[in-house]
Image (cartoon, rainbow, N blue to C red):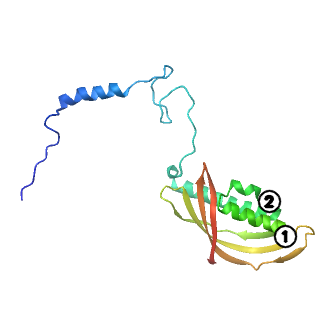
Amino acid sequence: MRARLVRSSPQSLTRAAALPILLAVCAVAGCGSSDPASSGELAPNGAFESGAAPSRAAAAPSAIPTAQLFKTVLDRYREYQAAYKKAYEKNDPSELNTVAMDPLLSQVSEDVEATKAKGEIWRFTNTFNPRVYARSKDSSKVYVIDCVRTLAAYRYSAETGKRLGGVPDGAYVYRATVQYDSGTWKVAANVRDSSC
């Protein structure tokens, strides 16, 4: 079998004929500026200069270096844990919306309200050891695994302050989804798994 030769360019189109076509396309495309205030220079934000201030959009998660991304996500996870503890101590879930999003936000808010309706307050102390174990392809979701150890957890009467009971200490694996939402990271899910 013989190899077939393939011509690199069509016979009818030569380099000399391509130059006028290229110039015509540039003229039709409007290789100039319609804004009289513009200098025509490319601004650092990637848009042609038009005299207007460039928008300062938050960097997409996929553009952030991995080490910085993971540090940011773990910091936000810890902030969620602190807000979670505070919500149960004060029976007020209002501050959770800065660090959590639905469906988790609704679940925790409903539970805090149910605890408040019973006239109880929970106080607890946990230790954390979170690690990133996966992320989505576009880095908009990062998955955190954590061995949460409860050192102490007690239920108190909101009226009298008397201790009503508690739960035994223990350690459980939690898997959390931390999701990028409108320029910030929020915990979207937190599921308890086996003991650790």
Q: Residue furthest right?
A: 160
Q: Which residue is rendered at x = 81% and y = 69% of the image?
A: 122
Kindly indicate whether the residue at mark 2 contacts the one at mark 1 (C-beta within 8 angstroms). Answer: no
At 19% across and 29% down in the image, what residue appears? 17
Left or right position of 158 against 100: right
Give the Cα separation between the discs numbered 1 and 2.
14 Å
Which residue, given by chain and number where applicable, does mark 1 sit on? 118
Q: Is residue 142 left or right of residue 27?
A: right
Residue 86 image point, x, y percent: 78, 61
**Looking at the picture, does residue 25 appear above or below residue 66?**
above
Numbered label attached to residue 149: none
Say which of 185 and 130 sits in front: 185
- Quadrant that contains the C terminus: bottom right
Q: Is residue 59 visible?
A: yes
Query: Is 34 situated left or right of 169 in this image?
Result: left
Mark 2 residue element? loop
Q: Amino acid at mark 2?
A: Asp
User: What element does badge 1 sit on?
Assistant: loop
To which quarter of the image does residue 169 belong?
bottom right
Q: Residue at x 57, y 30 (%)?
A: 53
State whether residue 196 appears in this view: no
User: How many neighbours does mark 1 have within 10 angstroms: few (below 14), some (14-19), or many (20 or more)?
Assistant: few
Q: Is residue 95 left or right of residue 162?
A: left
The quarter in which the N terminus is drawn is: bottom left
Q: Which residue is mark 2?
A: 92
Single out the mark in the foreground, 1 or 2: 1
Question: Quadrant of residue 33 in the image?
Answer: top left
Q: Return the x and y of residue 136 as percentages of the image width and height.
A: 50, 60
